[in-house]
Amino acid sequence: MKQLLTALLLVAGACAGTTRDAHAAPGTIFIVEGQGGYTIGSVFSEGPDGFGGRLTLGVGGKFKGWPTRFYGIVNITSASLSGTVGSGIDRATTSRSWFAWSVGLRMLTPVALHLRFLADVSLGRAMVGSDATLLAGGERYHTDDDALLVEMGMGLQYRFTLNFALGVRVDVAIPTNLDSYDLLGELAGSASSDGGLMNPSFLLTATIHL
């Protein structure tokens, strides 16, 4: 009986030590995240698409007793989009370079062991450089535009270790005041009215937590 009691005390002591170690484990407050994937330029009349990438930096934490973490974030986004209008001799090709910055808020909350749901919203500015080539290269045009930008996204993140996670996310970028008359699109033969309200993106993410 004495040996059993001693064994139970040793097990209880080991569990208590593990709990203290877990509570004492250092938290993380900084994030450095790279994102990359497929982007559709739906706001443009010809609907160009291509690769988009983003760098996100953030700092934050959580309130005591709450599982959800909140981060202030800064995003730098770049995308290269290409499209076509018409066919044959009337075929026109377009390329759109998209560069944007934004600042905002991210929410990160656990949904299962190591799995986190995230959502963020940010405000900033988008700059667009557009080129069109018409008549087999016989005519070339370039335009520039910029707009106030709203970015929203959500996704899932799997945290492999305290400091590293991989994930997937879906984003929308809403330029609120791009010129409603898209001169370059019109020159390429695509009506400005065919453009949408937002650009969707489907991204893979890699995040370092510090």
Image (spheres, rainbow, N blue to C red):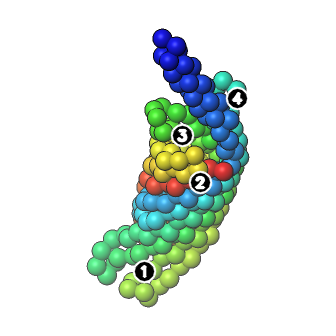
Percent of width and height locating residue 202: 44, 53
Residue located at (43% from left, 65% from top): 50
- Label 3 to label 1, Cα distance in Å? 43 Å
Do the numbered discs 3 and 1 sit on residues whose CB atoms are within 8 Å? no
Question: Going from the N terminus, do you reach mark 1 or mark 2 first?
Answer: 1
Percent of width and height locating residue 75: 64, 55
Q: SS of the residue at dot 3?
A: strand
Residue 131 or residue 105, whichever sits in front: 105
Residue 112 or residue 87, whichever sits in front: 112
Q: Which residue lies under the disc numbered 1?
A: 134
Q: Which residue lies under the disc numbered 3?
A: 118
Label 3 or label 1, whichever lies nearer to me, is 3
Q: Is residue 88 left or right of residue 26?
A: left
Q: Which residue lies under the disc numbered 2?
A: 208
Count of numbered circles on the image: 4
Question: Going from the N terminus, do you reach mark 4 or mark 1 first?
Answer: 4
Label 1 or label 2, whichever lies nearer to me, is 2
- Label 1 to label 2, Cα distance in Å? 45 Å
Q: Which residue lies under the disc numbered 4?
A: 63
Residue located at (41% from left, 69% from top): 83
Residue 104 in view here: no
Residue located at (66% from left, 24% from top): 65
Q: SS of the residue at dot 4?
A: loop
Tell me the kind of residue under disc 3. Answer: Leu
Tell me the kind of residue under disc 4. Answer: Phe
- Label 4 to label 1, Cα distance in Å? 57 Å
